[in-house]
């Protein structure tokens, strides 16, 4: 099924063209963007197509134009307003898109009943995990470096499943929504989950991410099937071609989730205790399945390493490869020696 269309009409040529170029270049929302500066051209387009969203500059909106579509109509306003289905146009394009996705993700009487998001036609998305049984092994630094380098090649999103990620402090950001809200929407049976998720997405160095949990309790209460649902939405109903998961501490995050990954990077530390812990983790019996039950294809005497061994890449990282501290620490990752190593991993594993 082809991706749905977001048609935009604004007689201000510079704005319309810039918005379309930005949105299609970023390619993060589950829509194909079409921009028009002339009402006659839009009319011809609407005779053959049925866009899910029609975004129209307030000064170009007429009663006749309102009758041309049965999709969701959203107005671009020149000043901020509390009216429904309105977005202030003179703000960052990313903010405009986020507000449009928020409106579209809600219920609207003009949206035809049963009209879903549909699956986007794209290359198969890869799920890449970064995990380690030991701490202080540069796991998150490598995940961010890998994600930013990968984002240069294809649309990539990062999920950080740690209980204390400190993203807000590192990036000097305040988040209104996070992974807890994403899981809530999935639990509530949200009809347009991809659009809802796009309202939460932030970006660092070209890498998209959903802000991590604020509370460890929320992370602990999230079930395996809910993580699977979230990953399915991101790989199937969005335009992302890579979903990168920075795993936190087990069992706060279940080992079952490693089974969802096409490839798993495991940073290690160079000391006796780390070696013992990693060996103990990999050699423990496999218990992949729901409610403590094993899957039929996973024998009881199969270890975790045997189960995921072909997908596992063990890494020995050097903390001297990290960039020096500073306000833009994450953003400088791709230009450090760790970033160069991440590029080597991408080339070696054909990501």
Image: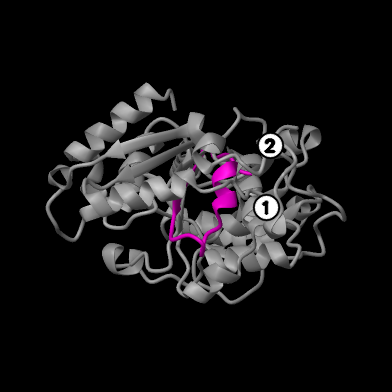
The residue located at (43%, 23%) in the rendering is 350
Q: Residues within 10 Å of mark 1 (few under 14, many from 20)?
A: some
Question: Is residue 200 toward the left or the right of residue 278 in the image?
Answer: right
Residue 266 seen by the camera:
yes
Tell me the CA gap for discs 2 and 1.
20 Å
Question: Is residue 281 toward the left or the right of residue 30 in the image?
Answer: left
Which quadrant of the rendered structure holds the C terminus?
A: top left
Q: Indicate the secondary structure of the residue bearing disc 2.
A: loop
The magenta stretch is: 238-260
Judging depth in this view, the residue of 214 and 298 nearest the camera is 298
Q: Which mark is residue 175?
A: none
183 relative to 66, above or below: below
Instruction: Examine the structure image and report whether residue 107 is included in the region drawn in magenta.
Output: no
Residue indicated by mark 2: 3
Residue indicated by mark 1: 229
Where's residue 47, x and y in %? 80, 35
């Amino acid at each position: 099924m082809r991706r749905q269309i977001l048609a935009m009409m604004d007689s201000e040529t510079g704005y319309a063209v810039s918005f379309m170029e930005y949105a299609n270049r970023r390619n993060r929302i589950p829509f194909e963007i079409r921009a028009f500066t002339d009402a006659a051209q839009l009319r011809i387009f609407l005779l053959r197509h049925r866009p899910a969203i029609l975004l129209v500059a307030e000064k170009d909106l007429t009663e006749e134009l309102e009758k041309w579509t049965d999709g969701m109509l959203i107005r671009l306003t020149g000043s901020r307003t509390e009216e429904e289905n309105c977005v202030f146009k003179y703000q960052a394009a990313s903010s405009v898109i986020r507000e449009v996705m928020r409106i579209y993700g809600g219920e609207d009487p003009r949206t035809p009943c049963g009209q879903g998001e549909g699956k986007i036609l794209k290359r198969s998305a890869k799920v890449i995990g970064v995990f380690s049984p030991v701490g202080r092994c540069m796991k998150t630094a490598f995940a961010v470096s890998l994600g930013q380098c990968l984002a240069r090649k294809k649309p990539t999103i990062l999920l950080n499943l740690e209980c204390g990620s400190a993203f807000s402090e590192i990036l000097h950001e305040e988040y209104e929504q996070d992974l807890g809200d994403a899981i809530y929407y999935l639990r509530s049976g949200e009809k347009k989950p991809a659009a809802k998720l796009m309202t939460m997405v932030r970006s660092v160095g070209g890498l998209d991410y959903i802000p991590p949990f604020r509370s460890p309790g929320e992370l602990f209460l999230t079930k395996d099937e809910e993580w699977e649902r979230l990953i399915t939405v991101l790989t199937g109903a969005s335009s992302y071609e890579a979903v990168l998961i920075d795993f936190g501490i087990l069992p706060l995050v279940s080992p079952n989730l490693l089974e969802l990954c096409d490839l798993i990077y495991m940073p290690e530390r160079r000391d006796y205790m780390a070696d013992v812990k990693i060996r103990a983790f990999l050699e423990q019996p496999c218990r992949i399945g729901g409610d403590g039950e094993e899957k039929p294809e996973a024998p009881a005497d199969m270890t975790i390493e045997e189960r995921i061994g072909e997908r596992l890449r063990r890494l020995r990282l050097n903390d001297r490869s990290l960039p020096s501290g500073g306000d833009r620490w994450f953003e400088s990752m791709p230009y450090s020696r760790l970033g160069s190593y991440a590029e080597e991993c991408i080339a070696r594993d054909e990501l």
